Amino acid sequence: MMKFLILIDRNTIRENRFAGKRIHFLPGRSTKTETGTVVFDVLELHTLEPAPTHFFEYIPTTVICENCGHIFLHTELLDDEILGNFYKNFCPKCHESECCEIEFEQLKPEMIGETDKDKGEIGR
């Protein structure tokens, strides 16, 4: 099976100021009181894994379906759960699962560099 490497877009790497935390507070619904004051509900989100040190995006990459030969971007791949079984990498044309093998590049310290200072921090 043909394997495709999906690369990190170096221009999208951003520092996460909440790195390592497992509890996050997110703004929820806003309501207006009788006095006109706007009050926001706060949603408390608990995660099993600590928040990552950085956020980033992957470069959309062209892949080829092993079953029908359809050429498309990896972002068009579909996943599904059928009767409790999880299937991944469905071709958007022939709908066969595992139509190609994908490996995602992992973030490495040398990729981070000084760019965070220029781009601004996420979560401020």
Image (cartoon, grey):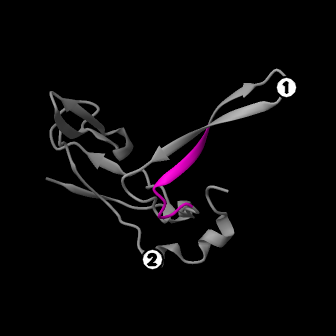
Above or below, 55 against 71 in this view is below
Kindly identify the amino acid type of the residue bearing the numbered disc 1: Gly
The answer to which quarter of the image holds residue 16 is bottom right
Q: What is the magenta range?
A: 18-27
Q: Earlier in the sequence, mark 1 or mark 2?
A: 1
- Within the magenta stretch, is there residue 79? no
- Within the magenta stretch, is there residue 21? yes
Kindly identify the amino acid type of the residue bearing the numbered disc 2: Pro
| Extreme residue toward the front, this view | 34
Task: Write down the residue under mark 1.
Answer: 36
Q: How many angstroms separate mark 1 from mark 2 (CA)?
A: 49 Å
Badge 1 element: loop
Q: Residues within 10 Å of mark 2 (few under 14, many from 20)?
A: few
Which residue is at the front of the view, 115 or 50?
50
Is the residue under label 2 in contact with that under label 1 (CB below 8 Å)?
no
Task: State whether residue 9 appears in this view.
Answer: yes
Which residue is at the front of the view, 74 or 26?
26
